[in-house]
Amino acid sequence: MNLDEFIDHEILVRDVIRQYLPPPQLLPCADWADTWRKIAKGPEKGAWRTSRTPYLREPMNCTDSDSPVQRIVMMFATQLGKSEVGYNAVLKRIHTEPMDMLFVQPTLQDAKDHSSQRFSQTIKAMPYVQARIAEVRSRDETNTLLTKEIADGTATLYFGGANSARSLASKPLPFAFCDEIDGYPGDVDQEGAPLELVWQRLSNFQNRKMLLCSTPTLKDSSLIESEYEASDQRRYFVPCPHCLVLQTLEWGATKPYGIKWLKTDSGEARPETAVYVCQHCGVAFEERHKTQMLEDGQWVAARPGAARGLVAGFQLSKLYSPIGWRSWAELVDDWVKAQAARKIGDKTKLKTFINTSLAETWDDDGERTDASHLEKRAPDIPLGIVHWPMYVCTLGVDVQDDRLEAYKWAWGRGTERQLVDFKVFHGDPALDEDEAESPWTDLTAWRRAPTFHASGRISPILACFIDSGGHNTQAVYAYARSHRKEHVHAVKGQSIANKTVLGTPTLQDVNWRGVKRKKGAKLWPIGTDTAKSEIYGRLRVEAQGPGYVWLSKQLPQEVFRQLTAEKLVTEMVKGRPKLVWKKPAGRRNEALDCAVYALAAAHYVELEKWTHQWMQWETLFGVPAEDGKTPETTPHPSLPQPAPPPLPHLLRRERPRRQPTRDW
């Protein structure tokens, strides 16, 4: 027998012993994982090693039945192993102490996906655990994707979704694992908060355990943050390799200690030089020391004894990522990119960094952009003329019961933009185009009229988005249907957090058979919350350049007021705090709404992805002088206009017409 055969034989014997002999009963969760846990997929595939992530040992052991802790809260950055704590706690119970358990995901579909994919793959790698779970039988209610019978029916593992009260409210049980709780709704099926429904199921057990895991989201509305603040608030302290003083790892952007890096002579960051400066001795050390630091670290509670010692809270950032995972250099690169985006008014990358890397909530000040400040800083440029460095336009149209309001925005590199012009078309939108006094007729004439650039060229209007959410939905569909070849589309705003500015369209017209017509009107959904956050971020950009918003002094004061009418505030929605955009009673906001629609139209033509296209437009229109002064050019309608660069993603190849056939 050669060495490979001997090793294979030894593994086979060990697996047989593990499968058929009684497992040890009293191992702490971390020791059980080191002995029995197998990771099915990923870069750490194979046998579990707590030594790889020493910071998980204490949270895991808090899940043991003999631990006095009843509620374990893990506010962790992404990809640090927090969900594995829940898996280890569940798998250990299946293997050594079967009991009824509940595994909760944000939605019921998430729960089904976890059951059929990750959980299924995990137990397949552990036959001694899989042997204790009954096979899935779709016709047997006790053994489905959402219900796993354990130990010959003496216990059951339930999978539930926080959006389904029915999946949360069942018979009492002693253990629940609630994952990614910041994705839970505030109220589920009008029966209350999901976490409260789950806790009620555990209330009759002395050894009850509830594990709560999540990456934090928004300040004052994050569930995991509120749970952590109610806990003993433990943080992981590691020793400096030089002075050996225990300390938490901090980002240190505004502190003399923490992560630091060098810059080039031109001021560009060099992420590869990232080091950590000790808070106590001031000596910088490299990331290679982190493995030993993590091994020697310990959790320290900021509020020992809080909640009578029944709630243990743990917070951890990606600064603690083991060697080979997310490095300090990569975090510096993420930070630098987030700061660059912030300078042009885009705070989404910074928000992601704060949430997913630092494990902290995002605190948006919510201050309304000041209209008077925007008016004071506005340059004296003429209305109706596209200014450099903007070249192309989109339109946003708001539909009221007695009028249409249209705003024309021009765009340049880095989403630099200019409010070129606006127009109010009075009349009943219910009137068909070409009818007497129809505002749609006037809109078409205004939309098709040439928009001149300061160079004398004509700036094309690439798309027009019209709100369909009022009382004139069908009229908007009719207009969009008639002008779809000019990229005129109906839109509807959706106030949903983190929804993309522009979603996937749906067809609205059907034929006499009830089949949707491919060439009919399309309805494009708009993530208004995301769009407004983007617009307000850009309005705060002070330096002309990428991200800057050009507003002419010739605009009426009311336009400045409407653009800044709303404010991001915290309100209770279905029993949970939520950030919502609000405007004072009686304040008009049509200019802001139209800015949202025009921004969505810019996303429709994918302006944010343009690179060489901008070079083509700059070649056609020219660029201003190096001193920043705009060349004095008098636009003239008779000036020959070169063809604009094509937009390939907007062009559609015409399908050959089919030969007439009988329509049975």
Image (cartoon, rainbow, N blue to C red):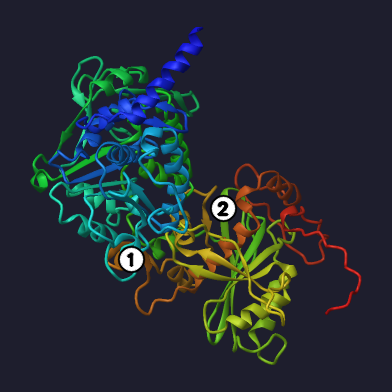
Residue 550 position by quadrant: bottom right
Q: Position of residue 580 (x, y in %)?
A: 36, 65
Q: Residue at label 1?
A: 188
Q: Position of residue 75 (x, y in %)?
A: 28, 43
Q: Position of residue 151 (x, y in %)?
A: 31, 44
- The answer to whether residue 580 is left or right of residue 453 is left
**Sequence order check, earlier mark of 2 and 1:** 1
Residue 286 position by quadrant: top left
Residue at screen point 32% across, 21% down:
290
Does 220 appear above or below 15?
A: below
Res. 259 in view = no
Amino acid type, mark 1:
Val
- Report the disc number at residue 416: 2
- The answer to whether residue 554 is left or right of residue 542 is right
Amino acid type, mark 2:
Glu
Residue that protrudes farthest toward the right in the picture? 659
Residue that protrudes farthest toward the bottom in the picture? 436
432 or 182, nearer to the observer: 182
- Determine crowd level at label 1: few under 14, some 14-19, many 20+ residues with C-alpha closer than 10 A: some
**Secondary structure beneath disc 1?**
loop
553 or 321, nearer to the observer: 321
